[in-house]
Image (spheres, grey):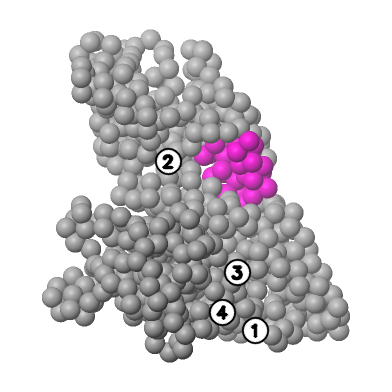
Amino acid sequence: MWPEALEGFLAAEAVSGLSPKDLEALSEAAFWSGNALPALDARQRAYSGYVNQGRSTEAASAALVTCTLYFMNGDTAVASGWLGRAQRLLIDLPECAGHAQLAWLEAQLMLLLKGHDQALDKAREVEAIGARVGDRDLVNLGICMQGNLRLHMGDVDGGMRLLDEALVAALAGELGPFATAEIFCEMVVSCLDATDYQRAAEWLETADRAGPGIVCFPGCCRVHRATLLRHRGNWSEAQREAHQARAELAGIEVLHEGMALTEMGELYRCRGELSLAEKAFAEAYEKGWPPQPGLALVLFAKNDLDGAGRMIERAVEHSTDEPAALLRLLPAQVEIALTVRDIELAQSAADRLATVAASLGTSAAVAADACVTGLLLDQRGDLVEAASQLSLSVRSWQKAHIPYEAAQVRMRLAAVLEALGDPTSANLELSTAQKTFERLGAAPEAREAARRLGATTPVVAARTFMFTDIVDSTALLTTIGDDAWHLVRRWHDSTVSAIVAERLGRIVKETGDGFFAVFEDPPVAVDCAVAIQRALEGHRRTHGFSPAVRIGMHVGSAISVDDDYAGRDVVVAARIAALAAAGEILVSADLADRVSTHVCVRRRAATLKGIPDTVEIGAMEWR
């Protein structure tokens, strides 16, 4: 709806120009379509139009919205200038909605500066003025902000009640787009800050049932949604949301882009794709967002215990007044400390976690605290109480509907039950954990659970295998030099990785100047290859250059070993890729016959190195 409206307004403006009111409507359409700069431009021109017409009330409102847009984009100095302009206009005006808008913005600034008492007074002022001027949006924005502030001031229950009240109005369709999106966003963020994942999931499901009429801010709301979906175990949907959020935020809201990258990194890490996780976390850090404890846990998984310990220690020091962050960081610090036998540090972190968990009081907080307590009891040899605490942790993670963490604790509980001489119960925990890991796609932990259950047969997986390779990379390196080649590779790697992830593929490893990736769905795999070639061609067309890439694909089965795949069908895919020309997608006939979305042409029999039988291959049309 919004993109079509934007096109209509732009077409109308090209013919006869737009009134200030129509420019405001154009700005709305541009903003909700994810086009921040046109939204700002149109709103500023609306302001000028109102000023020229002597309509100070409307001009003040346009100035305040412009201030809000700049503020959301992180341009605080420019936002401040527009705020001052609005304040001057409102001084001599009778009470109107603009005064409530101004109070709401001032409350936002006070909240950033930790002036909670002053911000709360302003939020009450927003509600009161909104009620007097009959503006339901402002009334509920004021109620929502009061709830958010009460939560920050320690009154979690009282704050959540106010947020619930405001969100009822928003999801009932009683409010405009901005108020609806702002209140929904505040609720989700507040739930994440309070680690109240149950409440967040309940509201998320309610919003989904309300249908597409419920608007959300482009980018940032999608990031928070990805976080909730990851916790709920909907990893595929979370991955799509995180990648789309990053695309919407790139170059506009740097910090939220860093949040999206962190979500992508967490999903990679949980699936055992450590190289991709490390890259995503590093990019998030470049954007100014702390990707912890994910990055420290990647180092921990790679056995860099010293680096992981130092990194998590700094993260904890920088998050002293952020309970939700500490609830994520302190369990990781305990795990790392126990691994290096620093019992004193582990106990100190556990004591601190107990305090944080008591202040939050949510199921997730109870679960994290009980798990850490159980690990320390196990370390001290108190196995009976350790099993009791770990069982409490499993139940609490289940109550919070967070399956991955519940499965992780089951693995630890199984070890304690084995030590207590109860192998039957231990195997039940391992089997349940294995099923959860397999459903989620947490391959390393699924294999570890299978190993502990005594699985001896190799895991055979049916997959579509894809190999990509930059053509004539050595010649290109020699031509453009090391520095330029580094930039080309970095762009190529991030582009291909993102497209593979968006199509729910998994990059198994880098192969020289390309990647080996696997997919569960053959049509999606081919669609991914086509998307890669089109992305490269599009960049070549708009920027003048991109590396030429060849792609080879085959469908079959292979033995899954330590995050890698081995077998004849993998070799066939690699050999097909070696035959491809620049910009070509070669596929086996077996794969082509399973795909109806793209046409396979120029079929022929090919002799592949190391494969005794000829293999029929063809080229996928993608242009």
Mark 3 Cα-neighbour bin, 10 Å: few <14, some 14–19, many ≥20: many
Query: Which mark is on residue 218?
Result: 2
Q: CA distance from mark 4 to mark 2?
A: 41 Å
Residue 186 within the segment the image draws in magenta: yes
Q: Nearer the viewer, residue 82 or 212?
A: 212
Q: Are marks 2 and 1 in contact (CB under 8 Å)?
A: no
Residue under label 1, please give it.
458
Element type at mark 1: loop
- Tell me which label, 2 or 1, sits earlier in the chain: 2
Residue 106 within the segment the image draws in magenta: no
Q: Is residue 494 left or right of residue 181?
A: left
Which amino acid type is shown beneath numbered disc 1?
Pro
Q: Provide residue 241's location: percent of width, then percent of height.
A: 49, 50
> Does any portion of residue 346 appear in the rendered image?
no
Q: CA distance from mark 3 to mark 4?
A: 18 Å
Q: CA distance from mark 1 to mark 3?
A: 17 Å
Q: CA distance from mark 2 to mark 3?
A: 29 Å
Residue numbers of the magenta segment: 183-209
Q: Is residue 421 above or below residue 428?
A: below
Q: Residue at x 50, y 17 (%)?
A: 135
Element type at mark 4: strand
Q: CA distance from mark 2 to mark 1?
A: 45 Å
Indicate the quadrant containing the N terminus: top left, top right, bottom left or bottom right. top left
